[in-house]
C-alpha cells in the first residue's frame, strides 16, 4: 500500500477511502472520483463464472458451514477455493472509540464530524472481522479442479468462534477465490435466522 488509510479492493485495486473535492469554497470528501466506492462499483459490475450459496448452523460457538458453487462453464485444471470470514455488526465497548482527525477543522464538511471530539465515544462498529476460518487464502482442494457447467460443488467445514458479543448480529461471509486469490463471487448469511 502506498499510503494510509488505504484499501485493497478484491486484493488487486488500491483505493483510498475518500478523496478531496472542493464545493463552494469548502473541502468535502467523497468516496467516488477514484476513491473506494469507485473501485467497489467496478468490481460489482464484473460478470462471475459461478453462482454461490451458503448455509450455516451454530451450536455452542461451533459453526458449521456448507458452501456451494455452480459454475456456468466447463473447465479443467482450475484452482478455485473457498474462504470464510465471520463478521459482526453493532460492536460496542467502553474501550472502543473512533479517532476523529476532522475535529475542530472548519475547512471541512463531513457530516458533523468536524464538530465532534477528537475521540468519539461511544462508537458502534459494523463489519468487524471476528475470525477467518483457518485459511486467509482459502481451503486448497475445497473446489474440484475439473468443473462441469451446471453441476453443484459443495464444501463443508466447521470452526469455532468464541469472541462474539451478540450472536444475532453475526454473519458468515463465503468467498469463492480464483488462483490469484481474487474473489470470483461471494455471499453471506446471518448466523441466526
Image: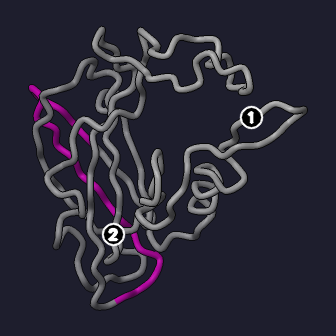
Q: Measuring 66% from the left and 46% from the top, which residue is drawn there?
A: 19
Question: What is the crowding at mark 1: few (fewer than 14 residues within 10 Å), some, or many (at least 20)?
Answer: some
Q: Where is residue 187 in the image (x, y as percent from the top left)?
A: 41, 50
Q: Position of residue 50 (x, y in %)?
A: 44, 69
Q: Measuring 39% from the left and 44% from the top, which residue is drawn there?
A: 188
Between 48 and 193, the residue placed more toward the observer is: 48
Element at badge 2? loop
Q: Where is residue 49 in the image (x, y as percent from the top left)?
A: 47, 74
Residue 140: which numbered mark, if any? none
Taking the magenta stretch, the answer to whether it contains residue 65 is: yes
Between 88 and 72, the residue placed more toward the observer is: 88
Question: Mark 2 or mark 1: which is in front?
Answer: 1
Taking the magenta stretch, the answer to whether it contains residue 155 is: no
Please give left or right for residue 191 compared with residue 120 in the image: left
Please give left or right for residue 57 compared with residue 111 in the image: left
Residue at the farthest bottom position: 76
Q: Which of marks 2 and 1 is nearer the N terminus?
A: 1
Magenta stretch secondary structure, dominant: strand
Verify CB contact (< 8 Å) between mark 2 and mark 1. no
| Quadrant location, the C terminus | top left
Establish if 53 lies above or below 170.
below
Establish if 100 lies above or below 58.
above
* Magenta highlight range: 56-75
Please give left or right for residue 46 compared with residue 54 in the image: right
Please give left or right for residue 5 compared with residue 174 in the image: right
Q: Where is residue 123 in the image (x, y as percent from the top left)?
A: 43, 15
Establish if 102 lies above or below 42.
above
Q: Quadrant of residue 130?
A: top left
Q: Mark 2 points at which residue?
A: 181
Q: Mark 1 points at which residue?
A: 28
Q: Measuring 42% from the left and 55% from the top, which residue is drawn there?
A: 186
Between 180 and 5, the residue placed more toward the observer is: 5
Amino acid at each position: 500500500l502506498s499510503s494510509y488509510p488505504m484499501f485493497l479492493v478484491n486484493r488487486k485495486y488500491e483505493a483510498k477511502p475518500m478523496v478531496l473535492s472542493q464545493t463552494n469554497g469548502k473541502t468535502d470528501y467523497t468516496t467516488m472520483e477514484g476513491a473506494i466506492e469507485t473501485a467497489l462499483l467496478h468490481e460489482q459490475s464484473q460478470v462471475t463464472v459461478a453462482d454461490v450459496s451458503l448455509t450455516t448452523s451454530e451450536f455452542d460457538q461451533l459453526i458449521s458451514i456448507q458452501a456451494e458453487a455452480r459454475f456456468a462453464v466447463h473447465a479443467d485444471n482450475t484452482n478455485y477455493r473457498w474462504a470464510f470470514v465471520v463478521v459482526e455488526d453493532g460492536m460496542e465497548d467502553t474501550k472502543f472509540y473512533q479517532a476523529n482527525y476532522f475535529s475542530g477543522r472548519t475547512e471541512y464538511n463531513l457530516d458533523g464530524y468536524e464538530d465532534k471530539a477528537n475521540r468519539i465515544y461511544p462508537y458502534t462498529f459494523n463489519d468487524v472481522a471476528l475470525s477467518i476460518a483457518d485459511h486467509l487464502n482459502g481451503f486448497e482442494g475445497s473446489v474440484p479442479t475439473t468443473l462441469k457447467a451446471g453441476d453443484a460443488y459443495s464444501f463443508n467445514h466447521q470452526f469455532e468462534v468464541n469472541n462474539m458479543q451478540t450472536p444475532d448480529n453475526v454473519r458468515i461471509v463465503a468467498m469463492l477465490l480464483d488462483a490469484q486469490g481474487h474473489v470470483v463471487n461471494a455471499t453471506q448469511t446471518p448466523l441466526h435466522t
